[in-house]
Amino acid sequence: ELREKILRCTDALSEALKTCVQKSKKAAAQFPSVTAVQEMVDSVVDISHLAADLKVAMLQAVQLSL
């Protein structure tokens, strides 16, 4: 169960990184569009949250292995 959670977290983080690259390219192409820049910023925030979720899952795995 924990392994599946870690895999889900890594998959979600990978997708969020891909999305962030797309949003960053869009923001650069449409600069100074506030909407495009805000979408890019939101995608970075999503990455931060997903990375924190992955960290928690990994820490749980470490604690269970001790």
Image (cartoon, rainbow, N blue to C red):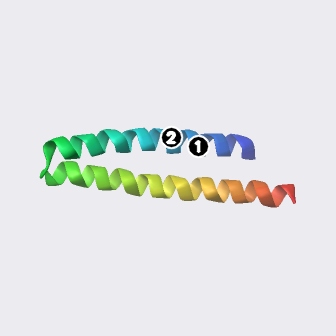
Position of the N terminus by quadrant: top right
- The residue positioned 37% from the left and 40% from the top of the image is 19
Query: Which residue has dot 2 on it?
Result: 14
**For numbered disc 1, what is the local secondary structure?**
helix
The answer to whether the residues at label 2 and label 1 have Cβ atoms under 8 Å apart is yes
Percent x, y of residue 15: 46, 38
Mark 1 nearby-residue class (10 Å; few <14, some 14–19, many ≥20): some
Mark 2 nearby-residue class (10 Å; few <14, some 14–19, many ≥20): some
- The residue positioned 87% from the left and 60% from the top of the image is 66
Q: Which mark is residue 10?
A: 1
Pick out the residue farthest to the right: 66
Three-letter residue code for mark 1: Thr
**For numbered disc 2, what is the local secondary structure?**
helix
- The residue positioned 85% from the left and 55% from the top of the image is 65
Percent x, y of residue 60: 74, 58
> Going by the image, does 32 lie left or right of 66?
left
Three-letter residue code for mark 2: Ser
Pick out the residue farthest to the left: 32
Percent x, y of residue 16: 44, 43
Among the 4 quarters of the image, the one containing residue 28: top left
> Going by the image, does 55 lie left or right of 45?
right
Q: Is residue 22 visible?
A: yes
Q: Which mark is residue 29?
A: none
Among the 4 quarters of the image, the one containing residue 62: bottom right
Using the numbered discs, state the Cα–Cα distance from disc 2 to disc 1 in whole angstroms: 6 Å
